[in-house]
Image: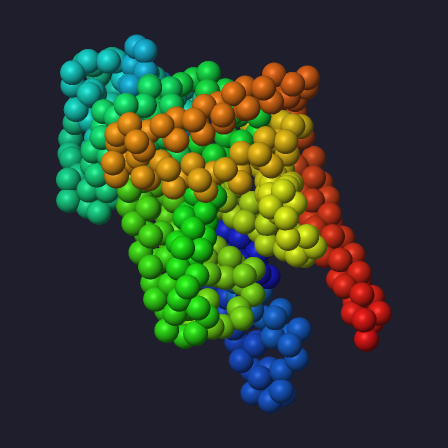
């Protein structure tokens, strides 16, 4: 499945980057590869595995090209905004209050009546009208958009609400999340700690202190404040650990897996069904179902299958930074499994997981964010093992926001706050202004791939020698 997923990605990238290639070219490639594969099977009756893989890969590239070509029919909004324009937008999150404005992510649907796509960051003046906006609202906005930074500043009289979404599952989930945010805000935790708990549990960063965000970023653990695969995986692991007494028999696996699926998707619902959480929930659902069935399925195959499903449904996810970070991090952790098996000590496992995820996402982080945190391993080894306890205490506080549940959570959050502040102040904590460029990014990606291959080959040879010695 991994080569098939990579071939689909290549097809989407080429089809999107070369819109001049007509649909007929991709249809000819699809038809010829499928026909050649079918004729070869009929004539030879016994098809070589490598030849079959070649036909499957060519077919995947053709399908990817068609999907990439299909989504390129509307133009990106940055190509259409060269002067003050009318933009039709759909809000993709609940507005976040700032000092002098409301910030919200929005999806562009039309520019001056022409169909467009892409997202931008919308800033609205802090007035009563902007405070009533919610996820799913559709606006018509007039203004001059900053195409380089993907931003648009709007005054109160330059936008009009043209529609509201109050019935979709995502809209209802977002309303539930905001209700829970207000519940946590009304508890005894102080504002700084409550903002951290809200980000950790509900993915709401509207109350997160800017200084706290900066110190977590400089310490290399900003991912802890963004609900994604780490939180979903920790929750699934916690539920599995609490239900260890069900055993490994078929009935026990089914009951435990069903409760894990319920917890994973319930957590996704609590966090507003954010795309990153939904992606993580889908990936872990495949792992859980595979374990329920008692199948020894390769986890890399499951990851590749999840990528195939998502990219076929939404090809533009390939160019989404969050999607790239999620899948590269999980792929890095899966490729580092031989290292995880060397020592069954939590310090070693936390170090390996942090190192593998950071190394795998290095090409994306350098190309997009242009910075690197050399002390990331120190912070991750200490904070990530505590993340499961943090998540559990935060969920307990969410269910019962009182002094009894607030005290242990406050102590642990305070420790994380002070520790990340200390790490962020270490010499050379952040290396800025790194711009590898497209060629440099590709070379870094190749180097990262060979590092993982070297690790796997070396450990496999070591294990073979160890097994021969034991025999």
Residue at (49, 35) in percent of width and height: 223
Residue at (32, 33) in percent of width and height: 405
| Nearest to the observer: residue 277 or residue 305 | 277
| Nearest to the observer: residue 433 or residue 152 | 433
| Nearest to the observer: residue 33 or residue 21 | 33
Residue at (36, 28) in percent of width and height: 407
Residue 244 horizontal/vertical position (percent): 43, 61
Residue 77 horizontal/vertical position (percent): 38, 31
| Nearest to the observer: residue 181 or residue 433 | 181
Residue 267 horizontal/vertical position (percent): 33, 46
Q: Is residue 357 above or below residue 2?
A: above
Q: Quadrant of the C terminus?
A: bottom right
User: Position of 100 compared to 236: left or right?
Assistant: left
Q: Residue furthest top?
A: 100
Residue 75 horizontal/vertical position (percent): 39, 37
Q: Is residue 48 above or below residue 363?
A: below
Number of numbered discs on residues: 0
């Amino acid at each position: 499945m991994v080569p098939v997923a990579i071939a689909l990605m290549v097809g989407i990238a080429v089809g999107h980057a070369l819109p001049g290639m007509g649909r007929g070219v991709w249809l000819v490639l699809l038809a010829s590869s499928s026909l050649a594969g079918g004729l070869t099977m009929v004539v030879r009756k016994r098809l070589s595995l490598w030849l079959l893989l070649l036909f499957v890969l060519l077919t995947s590239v053709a399908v990817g090209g068609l999907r990439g070509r299909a989504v390129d029919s509307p133009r990106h909004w940055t190509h259409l905004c060269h002067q003050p324009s009318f933009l039709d937008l759909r809000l993709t999150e609940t507005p976040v209050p700032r000092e002098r404005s409301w910030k919200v992510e929005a999806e562009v649907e039309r520019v001056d009546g022409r169909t467009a796509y892409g997202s931008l960051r919308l800033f609205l003046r802090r007035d009563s009208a902007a405070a009533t906006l919610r996820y799913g609202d559709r606006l018509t906005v007039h203004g001059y958009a900053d195409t380089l930074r993907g931003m648009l500043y709007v005054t109160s009289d330059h936008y009009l609400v043209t529609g509201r979404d109050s019935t979709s599952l995502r809209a209802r989930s977002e309303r539930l999340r905001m209700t829970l945010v207000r519940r946590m805000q009304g508890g005894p935790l102080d504002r700084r700690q409550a903002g951290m708990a809200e980000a950790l549990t509900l993915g709401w960063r509207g109350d997160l202190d800017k200084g706290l965000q900066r110190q977590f970023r400089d310490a290399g653990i900003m991912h802890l404040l963004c609900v994604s695969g780490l939180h979903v995986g920790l929750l699934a692991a916690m539920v599995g650990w609490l239900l260890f007494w069900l055993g490994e028999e078929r009935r026990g696996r089914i009951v435990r897996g069903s409760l894990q699926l319920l917890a994973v998707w319930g957590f996704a619902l609590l966090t507003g069904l954010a795309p990153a959480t939904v992606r993580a929930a889908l990936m872990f659902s495949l792992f859980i179902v595979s374990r329920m069935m008692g199948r020894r399925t390769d986890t890399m195959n499951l990851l590749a299958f999840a990528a195939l499903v998502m990219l076929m449904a939404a090809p533009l996810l390939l160019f989404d930074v969050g999607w790239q970070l999620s899948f590269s991090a999980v792929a890095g952790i899966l490729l580092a499994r031989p290292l995880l098996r060397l020592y069954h000590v939590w310090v070693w496992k936390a170090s390996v997981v942090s190192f593998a995820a950071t190394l795998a996402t290095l090409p994306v982080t350098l190309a997009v964010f242009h910075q690197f945190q050399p002390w990331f391993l120190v912070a991750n080894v200490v904070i990530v093992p505590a993340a499961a306890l943090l998540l559990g205490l935060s969920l307990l506080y969410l269910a019962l926001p009182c002094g009894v549940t607030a005290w242990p959570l406050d102590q642990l959050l305070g420790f994380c706050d002070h520790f990340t502040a200390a790490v962020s102040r270490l010499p050379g904590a952040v290396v800025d202004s790194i711009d590898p460029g497209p060629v440099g990014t590709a070379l870094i990606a190749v180097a990262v791939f060979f590092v993982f291959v070297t690790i796997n080959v070396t450990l496999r040879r070591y294990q073979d020698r160890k097994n021969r010695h034991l025999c």
